Image (spheres, rainbow, N blue to C red):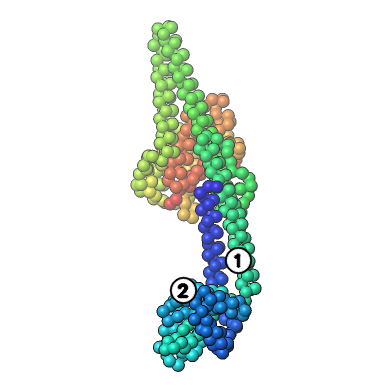
């Protein structure tokens, strides 16, 4: 058994047991059912009979009191003035209560001849003072009100105790067992088995443990997807780096073979491309790691969009970036990163829109502002929209010219998504009616 199981079992058992004991004690404390009462003359007769046995000695007097008590189903005790007891010994608690009662009786002369009764646990005690020379002797009679009922109660308590133990055992097992299984699953995931999942029986539970197991399953799936994406990213980076390196090797071989300088510009171009790719990958890594602290400066979003549109119109003329800015917005963010994120989308739209202009709009929707960038290119298949913002994804071949890449690195939109996410926003793509693609950027503003 584990410590968790023992802790759960002990806690549940003790709580329920203490509750049961408290219930019994409260019942007895407030039990006002009629009690058996022994008449005073009867008590006096018993006391006189007991006192007559004093000259017989302790042993004989004890036997006499025991025999008298068994005859009438009670226990009898004589308490001498010096505290010496004959008959059935009584507990210190009873003696303490009896002394308090005797003190009250002796202080009040009118109550000396009264009988004092009280209940203690399952027994009823009756105390009578008997004159013995110049002093008084205490005659204590005690009995169980209903022996058969008391026996039944003890049997019931035993059965209840057993039931409590079984219930606590089952409940502790029901809690501890799935937790132990979840622990094994977590250990397997930590050791690299990303296919490990909690058992379906646990995930089907409709309680907190079931919710925990479902959360763990989703976490394991997310980790599995993340690792798979990282592996794919490494493969893609390796492929992207290998291509310019291979071209450089070929160019260097030609230079070495022919001794000509005509291939040096090609080598330089490939090195620039390689440097740009590495820079984009590093930018994406910094942004996704969250280790780059973003600035929180006021940004006039409408003015930023106008500047981006002017720069793009100049770069891609005669095509133009047409703006429709229906709202003014100033938000806090990093101007450089936010401009870079939006420029990536605008440049991407121009690259794939060989004919026509690119539309840039700014609207407000509730607490957010929406930047929509639309092109008139061939669009993207619906099944590829969700993965458009993954690294090294350039859409289908319809988005390329003669099946060749448009010169990007396939990292720009991934950077856009990370930057917008760091600014508390979202980015999504959708097919435009009539052809083309629309990218919507939502930012809190």
> Which sits earlier in the primary sequence, circle 2 or circle 1?
2
Tag count: 2
Residue 399 visible, this angle: yes
Question: Callout 1: helix, strand or loop?
Answer: helix
- In this view, the residue farthest toward the bottom is 110
Q: Position of residue 414 (x, y in %)?
A: 48, 36
What residue did someone put label 2 on? Answer: 93
Q: Looking at the image, is 151 positioned above or below residue 340?
A: below
Picture quarter containing residue 17? bottom right
What residue did someone put label 1 on? Answer: 157
Q: Looking at the image, is 272 positioned above or below residue 425?
A: above
**26, 72: nearer the viewer:** 72
Residue that appears at 46% across and 73% down: 93
**187, 384: nearer the viewer:** 187
**436, 164: nearer the viewer:** 164
Q: Position of residue 413 (x, y in %)?
A: 48, 36
Left or right of residue 243, residue 397 in this image = right
- In this view, the residue farthest toward the top is 258
Residue 211 visible, this angle: no
Residue that appears at 57% across and 44% down: 181
Residue that appears at 44% across and 38% down: 288
Question: Callout 2: helix, strand or loop?
Answer: helix
Judged by depth in the image, the label closer to the viewer, 2 or 1, is 2
**422, 265: nearer the viewer:** 422
Q: Position of residue 209 (x, y in %)?
A: 56, 51
Disc ID at residue 36? none
Q: Position of residue 364 (x, y in %)?
A: 47, 52
Q: Residues within 10 Å of mark 1 (few under 14, many from 20)?
A: some
- In this view, the residue farthest toward the front is 56
Cα distance in 3D space between marks 2 and 1: 24 Å
């Amino acid at each position: 058994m584990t410590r968790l199981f023992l802790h759960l079992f002990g806690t549940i058992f003790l709580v329920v047991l203490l509750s049961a004991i408290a219930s019994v004690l409260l019942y007895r404390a407030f039990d006002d059912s009629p009690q058996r009462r022994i008449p005073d003359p009867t008590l006096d007769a018993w006391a006189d009979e007991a006192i007559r046995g004093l000259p017989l000695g302790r042993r004989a007097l004890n036997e006499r009191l025991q025999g008298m008590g068994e005859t009438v189903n009670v226990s009898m005790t004589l308490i001498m003035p010096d505290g010496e007891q004959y008959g059935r010994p009584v507990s210190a608690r009873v003696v303490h209560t009896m002394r308090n009662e005797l003190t009250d009786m002796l202080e009040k002369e009118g109550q000396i001849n009264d009988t004092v009764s009280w209940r203690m646990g399952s027994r009823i005690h009756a105390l009578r003072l008997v004159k013995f020379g110049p002093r008084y002797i205490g005659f204590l009679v005690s009995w169980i009100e209903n022996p058969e009922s008391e026996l039944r109660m003890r049997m019931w308590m035993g059965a209840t105790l057993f039931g409590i133990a079984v219930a606590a055992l089952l409940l502790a097992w029901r809690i501890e067992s799935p937790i132990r299984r979840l622990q094994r699953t977590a250990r397997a995931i930590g050791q690299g088995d990303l296919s490990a999942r909690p058992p379906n029986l646990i995930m089907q539970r409709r309680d907190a443990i079931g919710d925990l197991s479902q959360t763990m399953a989703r976490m394991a799936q997310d980790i599995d997807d993340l690792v798979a994406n990282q592996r794919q990213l490494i493969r893609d980076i390796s492929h992207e780096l290998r291509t310019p390196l291979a071209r450089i090797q070929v160019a260097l071989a030609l230079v070495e073979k022919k001794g000509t300088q005509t291939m040096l510009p090609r080598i330089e171009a490939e090195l620039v491309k390689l440097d740009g790719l590495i820079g984009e990958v590093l930018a994406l890594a910094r942004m996704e790691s969250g280790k780059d602290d973003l600035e929180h400066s006021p940004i006039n979003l409408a003015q930023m969009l106008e500047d981006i549109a002017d720069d793009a119109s100049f770069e891609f003329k005669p095509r133009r970036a047409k703006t429709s800015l229906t709202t003014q917005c100033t938000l806090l963010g990093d101007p450089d990163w936010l401009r870079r994120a939006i420029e990536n989308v605008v440049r991407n739209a121009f690259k794939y829109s060989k004919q026509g202009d690119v539309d840039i709009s700014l609207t407000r929707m509730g607490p957010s502002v929406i930047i929509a960038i639309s092109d008139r290119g061939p669009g993207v298949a619906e099944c590829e929209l969700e993965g458009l913002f993954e690294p090294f994804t350039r859409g289908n071949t319809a988005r390329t010219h003669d099946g060749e890449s448009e010169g990007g690195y396939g990292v720009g939109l991934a950077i856009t998504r990370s930057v917008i996410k760091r600014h508390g926003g979202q980015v999504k793509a959708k097919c435009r009616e009539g052809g083309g693609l629309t990218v919507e950027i939502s930012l809190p503003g």
